[in-house]
Image (cartoon, grey):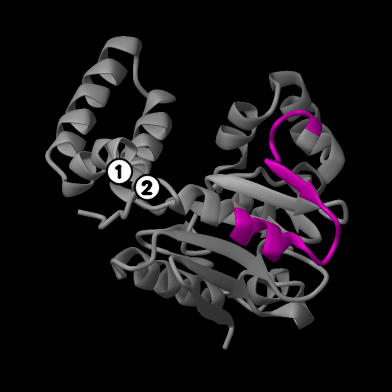
């Protein structure tokens, strides 16, 4: 399968599986990744997903061989490039990067909510070296995730940023040894999953929206999301578990 899907309790692991092509994105991979995200989003028992890749490269971006052969689409109508970068999601997605993420590969990583990377990982937008621009979200998301001048240097020179520097500047949440990224991402997912899932999703939505809204609109959105959470069973369970001095038993409703 060009995209693999594994259940790990409340977490699923989605793996890009074109190692012979450095997991470059062709139309088949884009459609398969969208299908995997659909499956994750539709599963009430799955609360968080990890996006990983087989082989020494995370993703080499667009499949240039497919483009040379006449391919005009490397994405989907809902998800954009790779079936993901423009996809509206409700649940947390953690990138587990254990090698180079290049061009569209970096844009795939930037579309995730959290990033776990090994010291073998690197990120780059080399499009200007080929008279292209990073039009699949890289030029929008990178300066939100890194200091402006560092993002500008990456985009204008096309040079890669290694994972250690990315971690130093906050792009990478966890920096680990090669070969351990999925394990570390699953541990981070477990940490997220210990919390009330509907509250996690509402919090994620508020943070993402805050980058697009002024303060007044953001506060109003926060109020609406809080009202939705107050009406859930999990809202009552949180204080009850605290009073009874036991771990909460989240139901996701």
Residue 173 part of the magenta-drawn span:
yes
Residue 73 in sight from this viewpoint: no
Judging depth in this view, the residue of 212 and 218 nearest the camera is 218
What residue is disc 1 on? 241
Q: In this view, does 20 lie above or below 144?
A: below
Where is residue 98 drawn, in percent x and y? Answer: 78, 61
Q: Earlier in the sequence, mark 1 or mark 2?
A: 1
On residue 193, the disc is: none
The answer to whether residue 136 is left or right of residue 221 is right
Marks 1/2: CA–CA distance: 5 Å
Judge by depth and name the residue closer to the eye, 107 or 250: 250
Instruction: Farthest residue to the left: give it.
Output: 231
Residue depicted at 48% across the width and 58% down the height: 84
Q: Name the residue under label 2.
A: 246
- Residue span colored magenta: 168-187
Which residue is most to the bottom? Answer: 1
Q: Residue at x 23, y 46 (%)?
A: 234
Q: Which residue is depicted at the point 69% across and 46% down?
A: 132
- Position of 118 with respect to 190 (left or right) is right
Up-down: is 26 above or below 191?
below
Q: Is residue 77 left or right of residue 62?
A: left
Task: Please tell me whether mark 1 sits on a helix, a strand or a loop.
Answer: helix
**Is residue 80 shown to the viewer in this render?**
yes
Label 1, residues with CA under 10 Å away: few <14, some 14-19, many ≥20? few
Mark 1 vs 2: CB contact within 8 A? yes
Please, what secondary structure does the residue beneath circle 2 have? loop
Quarter of the figure with the N terminus: bottom right
Which percent across, then down, holds residue 89? 37, 52
Q: Position of residue 246 (x, y in %)?
A: 37, 47
């Amino acid at each position: 399968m060009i995209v693999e899907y594994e259940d790990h309790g409340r977490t699923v692991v989605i793996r890009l599986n074109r190692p012979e092509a450095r997991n470059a994105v062709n139309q088949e991979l884009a459609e398969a990744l969208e299908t995997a995200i659909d499956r994750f989003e539709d599963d009430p028992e799955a609360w968080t997903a990890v996006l990983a890749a087989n082989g020494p490269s995370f993703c080499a971006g667009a499949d240039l061989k497919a483009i040379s052969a006449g391919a005009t689409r490397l994405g989907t109508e809902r998800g954009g490039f790779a079936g993901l970068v423009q996809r509206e999601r409700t649940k947390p997605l953690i990138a587990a990067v254990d090698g180079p993420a290049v061009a569209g590969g970096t844009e795939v990583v930037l579309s995730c909510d959290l990033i776990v990377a090994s010291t073998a990982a690197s990120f780059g937008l080399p499009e200007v070296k080929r008279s292209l621009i990073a039009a699949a979200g890289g030029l929008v998301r990178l300066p939100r995730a890194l200091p402006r001048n560092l993002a500008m240097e990456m985009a204008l020179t096309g040079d890669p940023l290694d994972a250690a520097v990315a971690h130093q500047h906050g792009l990478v949440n966890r920096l680990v040894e090669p070969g351990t990224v999925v394990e570390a991402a699953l541990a981070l997912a477990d940490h997220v999953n210990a919390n009330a899932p509907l509250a996690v999703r509402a919090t994620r939505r508020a943070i993402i929206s805050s980058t697009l809204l002024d303060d007044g609109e953001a506060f109003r959105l926060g109020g609406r999301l809080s009202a939705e959470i107050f009406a859930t069973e999990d809202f009552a369970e949180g204080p009850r578990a605290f009073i009874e001095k036991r771990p909460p038993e989240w139901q996701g409703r």
